[in-house]
Amino acid sequence: MATICRKKPLSESDLYIPVKDFLELQGYEVKGEVKGCDVVALRGNEELVVVELKLSFNLELIMQAVERLAVTSKVYVGIPVGSYSFKTRRRKMVKLLRMLGLGLMVVDVDVERHGVDIVLDPKEYQPRPLKERREQLLGEFVRRVGDPNLGGSSVRKGIMTAYRQRALEIALFLQSNGPTKASLVAQSTRDPKARDILYRDVYGWFDRPSSGIYELSLVGKREIPLWTHAR
């Protein structure tokens, strides 16, 4: 019977040699496990380079790396190229590290490829203001009536936005008055955008039995009571 050869599980120390080789090729003297730092490198009179190694991108790695900023501004985190977190969350990962002033090394431990890819070099973070996002956030805050949502609540089932509040007012009007012309709905609810809300029907709450006339749909009749408590 043939013997099944099981591959040895990857360990953090497996990342060390590729990182050491990479840095030494650039003229650094490299040592491992110095005062709690996984990798420390020095080249002439330049600032120290510190690399913290982990098999996955997690909070412990971030906290360790941030702590190293007390001794040098050149701090990298090193993770394997096949890390699930790197494959699925690369963009957010790089954004977080950039905000913290940390660098990112991706390590390939394969003996044939055996290398390091610098995805991000550490440098001081300079945020770029996004005026449009700020205005959207402020606009939603101002337009929303009251405080209908508990902070931290799951958004899977939806939250009470300013738009949903307006749609709910229209739905409640139709619930009380039955099929109504869109123009009359707009006039009665004092919402100049009522026609657009009825036409777009984002939540599936409205039906149009005839041209210009709207009424509550079966979905609306079922869901409206679920939202009235959050008005």
Image: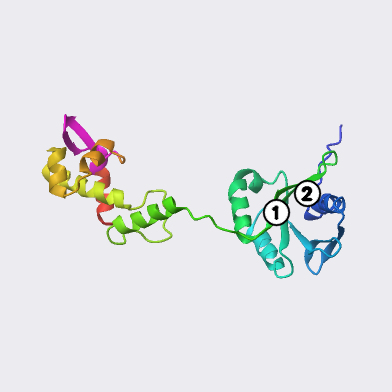
Position of the C terminus, as image quadrant, is bottom left
Amino acid residing under circle 1? Asp
**Quadrant of res 45:** bottom right
Q: Quadrant of residue 142?
A: bottom left
User: Is 71 left, or right, of 210 in this rendering?
Assistant: right
The quadrant of the picture occupied by the N terminus is top right
State the residue in front, 122 or 159: 122
Q: Secondary structure at mark 1?
A: loop
Q: Which residue is mark 2?
A: 10
Amino acid marked by disc 2 = Leu
The image quadrant that residue 204 belongs to is: top left
Q: Position of residue 136 (x, y in %)?
A: 38, 52
Q: Nearer the viewer, residue 231 or 27?
A: 27
Residue shown at 82% from the left, 54% from the top: 16
In the picture, the disc for residue 121 is 1
- Asked if labels 2 and 1 touch by Cβ distance under 8 angstroms, the answer is no
For the point 64% across and 61% down, the residue is: 124
Boundaries of the magenta span: 204-221
Q: x%, y% of residue 95?
A: 59, 52
x, y percentage for residue 56? 68, 52
Decide which of tag 1 and tag 2 comes sooner along the chain.
Answer: 2
Q: How many marks?
A: 2
